[in-house]
Amino acid sequence: MITSTHNRHVRYCRSLHRSRTRRQERAFLVEGIRLTREVLDADASPALALYDPEALKRHPEGQEILRRLEDMPQAFAATPTVIEAAAETQSPAGVVLVLPEPEPPDPSLLEAQDVALFLDGIADAGNAGTILRTAVATGLQAVIFVRPAVDPYSGKTVRSGMGAHFRLAVLEIEAGELQAMLHGFDQVLAADPKAEMTFLEVDWGKRTAIVIGSEAHGIRPEVQPSLTTSVRIPMATGVESLNAAVVAAILLYEARRPFLSVGPPFPGRS
């Protein structure tokens, strides 16, 4: 069992708290029982796992995770103090993993998508993670971050994504690469509260690229020429704008509506 916070594995985990190191190492942290379960269920292979056996035994899901981690050669039991030292959060729930970043997906992956999502300069990690989670829920296979933007593999983005990183491809590009990637889409649209057309009037039958701008500045000037359509989301009088993650959710669900199956009603509903 690892008992020292100066252990090399702990130092390595702590180094991944920094974006620069994450990019150099092409690795990121995953913390907690729920995200660890997502990793294991997705058959992702952690490069390193530190876990507190006693903490995991206290949770039914943790007990199953413990059984799976104990069979991994790269997994090490550790004290609660060690787990806390390795983690970014104050309550990592007994487990910290190091995951290698997936290889960048082939841009041709977009060719098979009727709807694609580009995040232009999104800076808020919580919004980015929520958007990734929504993208998974609506059946997208990839999301493209247009830099400069938040690190898609920062701790907060990964936690907000709630497992989305293991269910879709994440691609980062420069603004100068955007035009080439949009080739082949029938329309490229973004939300604009001043637009005349509402999102309800869009012909979503066309192959569509949706661009979501940054929370503070919207779509950047160098990206504007790539747009073919601007749409607004109707709002009550006096409301100026919506959160970027909410805008993305509304547009994605409307765009993907024909492709989403209607599941059973909630229990108790008729």
Image (cartoon, grey):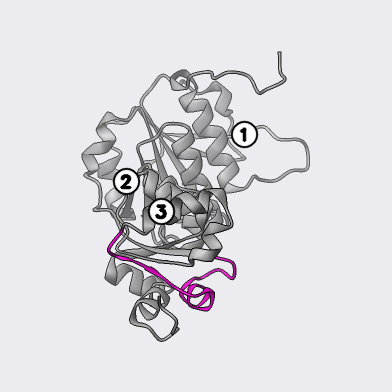
Q: Mark 3 = which residue?
A: 67
Q: What residue type is labelled 3?
A: Arg
| Residue in view at x 38 percent, y 49 percent | 40
The span from disc 2 to disc 3 (Cα, nearest Å) is: 15 Å
Highlighted range, magenta: 72-94
Q: Mark 2 = which residue?
A: 43
2 and 3 marks in contact (CB < 8 Å): no
Tell which circle, 2 or 3, labels the residue nearer the N-terminal end.
2
Mark 3 neighbour class, 10 Å CA radius: few under 14, some 14 to 19, many 20 or more = few
- Label 3: which secondary element: helix
Q: Mark 1 = which residue?
A: 233
Question: Relative to the observer, which residue lies in front, 217 or 46?
Answer: 46
- Label 2: which secondary element: loop
Question: Relative to the observer, which residue lies in front, 209 or 16?
Answer: 16
Q: Is residue 112 above or below residue 45?
A: above
User: Where does residue 25 sit, x and y in percent of width and height?
Assistant: 28, 70
Based on the picture, tell me whether residue 89 belongs to the magenta stretch.
Answer: yes
269 vs 36, left or right, is right
User: Where does residue 116 sit, x and y in percent of width and height?
Assistant: 38, 36
Mark 1 neighbour class, 10 Å CA radius: few under 14, some 14 to 19, many 20 or more = some
| Residue in view at x 53 percent, y 65 percent | 54
Q: What residue type is labelled 2?
A: Asp
The span from disc 3 to disc 1 (Cα, nearest Å) is: 48 Å
| Residue in view at x 44 percent, y 38 percent | 136
Q: Can residue 128 be seen in this view?
A: no
- Label 1: which secondary element: loop
The span from disc 1 to disc 2 (Cα, nearest Å) is: 39 Å
Tell which circle, 1 or 2, labels the residue nearer the N-terminal end.
2
| Residue in view at x 58 percent, y 18 percent | 264
Tell which circle, 3 or 1, labels the residue nearer the N-terminal end.
3
